[in-house]
């Protein structure tokens, strides 16, 4: 390829009155740096990075009370390198079974 860069995000917005809990999901991420990456950010901070995950994998993230933005980010050629050889990776990432377990609010 010509060294083009691409970032594709899906964002989960969690509301202001969220009382805290656990975000669970499954991911299939057959990516391989430096060609491509799969990164999960919570409120702009790196929380998880998957590389060469060729089977469905469970991911669990603890979330504090309050609003959050969770970004699932597929990043292609973020280093601007040209001329990648043929690859066995799919150039894609899949997420599934996303659920948010909310902690019980104490009174």
Image (cartoon, rainbow, N blue to C red):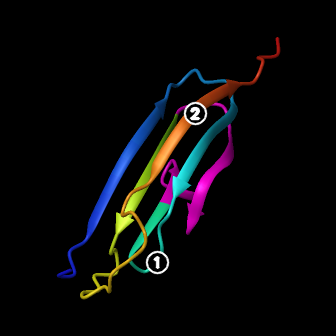
Which residue is under mark 1?
A: 33
In this rendering, the count of numbered labels is: 2
Horizontal side of residue 44 vs 56, given as left or right: left
Label 2 neighbourhood size at 10 Å, few (<14), some (14-19), many (20+)?
Answer: few
| Residue 63, magenta (yes or no) | yes
Expressed as whole percent of the image width and height from the top left, the position of residue 101 reads 69, 26
| Residue 89, magenta (yes or no) | no
32 or 106, which is in the foreground? 32
Instruction: Reply above or below: 41 against 104.
Output: below
Identity of the residue drawn at 46% across and 36% down: 12
- The image quadrant where one finds the N terminus is bottom left
Expressed as whole percent of the image width and height from the top left, the position of residue 57 reads 65, 51
Which residue is under mark 2?
A: 97
Identity of the residue drawn at 42% across and 80% down: 34
At mark 1, the secondary structure is loop
Extreme residue in the top direction? 107
- The image quadrant where one finds the C terminus is top right
Segment colored magenta: 39-67
Type of secondary structure dominating the magenta stretch: strand
Extreme residue in the left direction? 2
Instruction: Reply above or below: 60 against 107.
Output: below
Q: Earlier in the sequence, mark 1 or mark 2?
A: 1
Identity of the residue drawn at 58% across and 20% down: 17
15 or 10, which is in the foreground? 10
Expressed as whole percent of the image width and height from the top left, the position of residue 55 reads 60, 55
At mark 2, the secondary structure is strand
Identity of the residue drawn at 60% across and 43% down: 26
Question: Quarter of the image holding residue 80?
Answer: bottom left
Horizontal side of residue 42 vs 102, given as left or right: left
89 or 18, which is in the foreground? 89
């Amino acid at each position: 390829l010509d060294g083009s860069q691409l970032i594709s995000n899906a964002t989960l917005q969690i509301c202001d009155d969220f009382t805290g809990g656990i975000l669970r999901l499954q991911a299939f991420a057959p990516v391989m740096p430096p060609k491509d990456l799969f990164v999960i950010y919570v409120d702009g901070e790196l929380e998880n990075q998957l590389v060469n995950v060729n089977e469905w994998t469970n991911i669990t993230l603890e979330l504090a009370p309050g609003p959050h933005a969770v970004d699932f980010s597929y990043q292609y050629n973020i280093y601007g390198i040209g001329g990648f050889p043929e690859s066995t990776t799919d150039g894609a990432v899949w997420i599934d079974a996303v659920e948010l377990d909310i902690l019980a609010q104490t009174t």
